[in-house]
Amino acid sequence: MTALVRARDVRRDYPLERDAVHALRGVSLEIEKGEYLAIVGPSGCGKSSLLNLLGAIDAPTSGTVEIEGRNVGTLGDREVTEFRLRHIGFVFQRFYLLPILTARENVELPMAEAGVPPAERRERSTELLRYVDLGDRVRHRPSQLSGGEQQRVAIARALANRPALLLADEPTGELDARTGQEIISLFGRLNADGTTVVVVTHDESLARAARRVVHMRDGQIVQDGEVPHG
Amino acid sequence: MRLLLAFASLRRNRARTLLAVLGVAIAAAMLLDMVMLATGMRESFRALLLSRGFQMRLTPRGTLPFDTEASIAGASTITSSLRARPEIDLVSPVLGASVHVLRGDSSITTFALGVDATSQGDYQLAEGRDAIAPNSFVANDDFLRATRAKVGDTLRIAAGFDPQLRTHSGERALVVAGRARFLYLAAGQLAVAIPLRTLQEMTGAAHEDRVSLFMVRLRDTSTTASVKEWMRTALPTIDVISTADAMARVDERLSYFRQLSAILGAVSLIVGFLLVTTLVTVSVNERVGEIVVMRAIGVSRAHVVQQIVLEGTAMSITGAVLGTGLGLVTARYLNAILSRFPGLPSAIDFFLFEPRAAWTAIGLLAACGVLAGLYPAWRAASLPLASTLREEAVA
């Protein structure tokens, strides 16, 4: 297998007035193409900080993060934005769909930004919404959808530009158990179809669904192992 | 997609957007009115001066037309010498005086112009014949209404009145030959135009061969300076006022209006700018999470800025277009009020609509909309993604 993501001795400090918070203290991690990885650990252990670095929405204080062989910490704002657009998909705990757009328009947004022609955008957004079982909700606005449906639209949006890496930060955090289970199944299906998935979660059932679990504590990886699946 | 996002954002809070657009419309209306006021009276006065093609006015030294009772002696000689100049196309001698229309024991006082009907530039005949015959005159509507006279009637008119003896002098029976619109007189002012010779005879020795001013039309405006120079030398007791001189004096006297309109226009512009900035800032603050997520999923900083600036610009342009209509209506209303100002020619417009003025107002407000959106847009697009997402998640 080939390393899709390679983080080497990554540190991330958040300076305060007199001191600094050391969110990550020398984290090294490799993620292969096609993996399904869960990052778990107590609150404040640095999970989300690591995810932000893996998704190139933050830069390390020291160390390097390479995605598809590119050191994303050295890219300028324009380049790193373009990189996120074409190579990384994000799913957030609170969905963050644009309430003024329909489900289809939300999914089309990253494609429009990438310059995909309208006809192709329409075809792919329909296909993606069908994939997440929302083929009959394309014209609905987020306020007309349940939490689980909104998160599925967010997943479809994350997949819009066929990213190499899908990152999810507590994707079931705002959902009830049954709806969370639907999202977990969807991530499993996505991974089975070839998407590399990394999730940060407190949800044990979501962590168990992953093939590899990374445990963090105090800004460091304390355990990294495969999850046995019957 | 950016256009869709911008308009969808504006629709999200319709009442607020509507109120902001109305606010901008009022600012735009005031701005347009001020732009119209700044240039309107000047341009209107200029058009009035040139309406009959007379580029020069000759008045008694140190006076303006009809601002004193001073007059120019030797009018017939001066008229002949002016008419002899090859550069001069037309000379119109004018005498101004008060006359009294006698009606039994009472009389109605009116302003009279003594003119040469063949060369006059003071009125436009609307009905009947011109005042060619020595015993005829033309009058305006206000005069005919006040005297209840009509074209063809004969009226007894006197040029002088002795208040102690309560007797009139210079009395003549004159026929109303026509109805005319006087160009330079105030609204409501009663006026008649009588043949110059007749009025001079009626006013007696005081105005014998005298006029209040000459109006001069040149064949070619490029000779204005040389003709003016000749007049200054040949006619030392006379002031020569060209249209340019008159406009300079008007500019001087209207500087108050221009300063006032510039200040009020600037205030309107600032109010519009602050209104849009406030609205866009509030709107942006409400959706920081959305904006940061857009940036996180790969929407460029420039596109976020463009979308937010579009929102401000759309509000400003919509308000400015509505404000143009509102400004035109209010300008018409204000013009009607100001036109009744005593002593001003009724033909003067304070608010002169020119498409350029409307485009200026719309353009200034559109530019304000762009500037108003820039700061909140740039601030939103420059938010640090990771920390803002964390704050939003905690919130």
Image: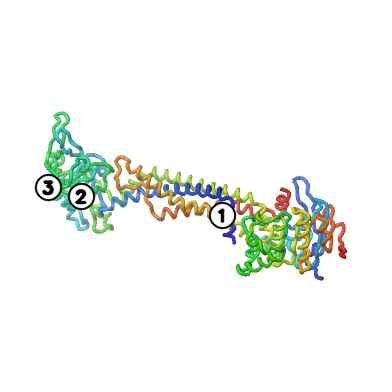
Tell me if residue B196 can be seen: no
Q: Are marks 3 and 1 on the same chain?
A: yes
Q: Position of residue B323 (x, y in %)?
A: 46, 50
Q: Residue at x 19, y 56 (%)?
A: B85
- Tell me if label 2 and label 3 are in contact, CB under 8 Å: no
The residue labelled by disc 3 is B134
At label 3, the amino acid type is Pro
At label 1, the amino acid type is Glu
N-term mark: 2 or 3: 3
Nearest the camera: A46 or A188? Answer: A188
Quadrant hosting residue B169? top left
Q: Are marks 1 and 2 on the same chain?
A: yes
Residue B63 appears left or right of A221 = left
For label 1, the crowd category at 10 Å Cα-Cα, with few meaning under 14, some 14 to 19 and many 20 or more, is many
N-term mark: 3 or 1: 3
Secondary structure of the residue carrying tag 2 is helix
Mark 3, chain letter?
A: B
Extreme residue toward the top, this view: B164
Secondary structure of the residue carrying tag 1 is helix
Nearest the camera: B113 or B192? Answer: B192
Quadrant hosting residue B342? top left
The residue labelled by disc 2 is B234
Q: Residue at x 51, y 45 (%)?
A: B271
Q: CA distance from mark 1 to mark 2?
A: 67 Å
The residue labelled by disc 1 is B311
Nearest the camera: A150 or A144? Answer: A144
